[in-house]
Image: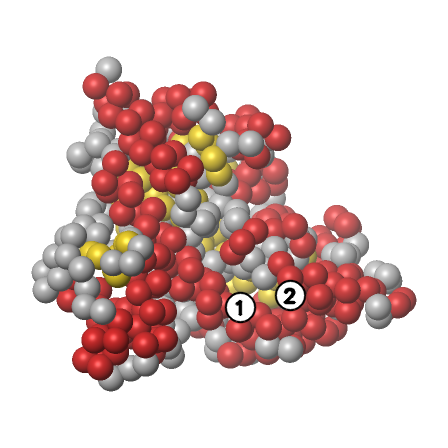
Amino acid sequence: METLYHQVADQVESLIRDGVFRDGERLPGVRVLSRQLGVSVATVLQAHQTLEGRGLLEPRERSGYFVRRPPVDAPEPAMSAQDARPVPVSLRDMAMDLCSDEEKRMVPLATAVPHPDYLPIRQIQQASIWAARRGLESLDYAFPGKSAFRRQIAQRMAALGVAVSPDEILATNGAQEAIIMALRAVTSPGDIVAVESPSFPGILQALEVVGLKVIEIPAHPAEGLSLEGLQLAMDQWPIRACVAVTNHSNPMGMRLSDEHKQRLVLMLENAGVPLIEDDIYGDLAHSGERPRPAKSFDRTGNVIYCSSFSKTISPGLRLGWIAPGRHFPAVRQQKYFTNLATATLPQIAVAHFLEQGGYDRYLRGARRTYRESVERLRSAVARYFPAGTAVSRPSGGFVLWVQLPANCSGTQVYRLARERGINVAPGIMFSTTGKYENCLRLNAANPWTPRIEEAVRTLGELAAAVLSD
């Protein structure tokens, strides 16, 4: 349930967007609004701070709060065309560039990694100290994972409509390892796997590691993976698995409806094709209830569920999990032969954090923070980029997909931006077939600073320069 000050903020935002309060006008004083709205002065001040975070108000010393021009809007990107045939995967060089030491010194708009200010650092430090004091319990092998951790995951999944026991869950070194193990369990080198397009580069890299071919299925920016496109591909090719990010996908931020998820699960079940579900962003819905995973509609164990805490608690913990359904024996064998076990100390620490309720308390604030960060970055892109630019409207997560005008090279913008100390992810990384040359992905999980705003302005200028060449 939304807090009172967020309800007040939404009410004032509606008045601004409806033109009741116009650009540059001073809002009534906080005491006046307090009386008009029937709330406390503290609630009004919190609402003002929220609207400031959304880019709709600006405080002026000794003068009050003034309305800023509502964010310029931009259309959503278009859906890509269906690919004709499967292709091998190769994305190594550019992916390595984005993880280099040089990248860490640039304005961080490329990698989908939250700024430390967005993470529960202090709480995890305290939980890690608690875990370290557990003695031998924190030092032994934990295969297939610490029981306390797997029990907490099972409880959280049950709340989402997924009935799995702790014994049906394996701890992993992040979601990437979970996806690789799932692929190895259900495919052989040279097999064809369907993925949504544009697709998260980590998924494409996992396919490359396992030696698979990929066929890209178009994804609508709001509705997600095209079921018609998937059916067409299955009619033409012997597809052995399908990988999909069902909630707030990276890079488009799209979320499949429950009906869409249910149809997807049933379609793949009837075809005998396993669904590998990556639900790493599900906990970061910007508002409303946490969306259900596709796994909640699985009745035959055909869905292999993968997730992690890399985007919410800490990327450095490298802690994820997999619920492989009927493929559990094959995945368990893959885990044992690959690295035997996931580090024990992070599992104990995170289990304690979950059990004490710290994670849910953190999420309540984090979801609002990400929503406001995405809205602010989206507004800046719409304001500073050339006319004809389209921007995704994610309902969760923290990345934006930017589609530049057709004849504007996102790869060229990426290279020019690196010369200016700004790192972005070029669109060609999100496909195996050279699509999305005129696209970029931007990371919104950064506190809004003059340095970030200037970087977005510079990107817009570079895109305009490339467009005019």
Q: Residue at x 46, y 48 (%)?
A: 446
Q: Residue at x 55, y 28 (%)?
A: 97
Q: Residue at x 65, y 71 (%)?
A: 353
Q: Nearer the viewer, residue 239 or 149?
A: 149
Q: Is 263 positioned to the left or the right of 160 in the image?
A: left
Farthest-out residue, front: 62
**Which of the numbered marks, if any, corresponds to residue 26?**
none
**From the viewer's perspective, is residue 299 above or below residue 382?**
below
Q: Residue at x 54, y 62 (%)?
A: 305
**Which of the numbered marks, if any, corresponds to residue 362?**
1
How far across and how far down the image is residue 240, in percent?
50, 49
How far across and how far down the image is residue 176, in percent?
59, 49
Residues at discs 1 and 2 in contact (Cβ within 8 Å): yes
> What residue is disc 2 on?
123
- Name the image quarter holding residue 269: bottom left
Mark 2 is on which residue type? Gln
Q: Regarding mark 2 in the picture, which secondary structure is present there?
A: helix
Q: Earlier in the sequence, mark 1 or mark 2?
A: 2
Mark 1 is on which residue type? Tyr
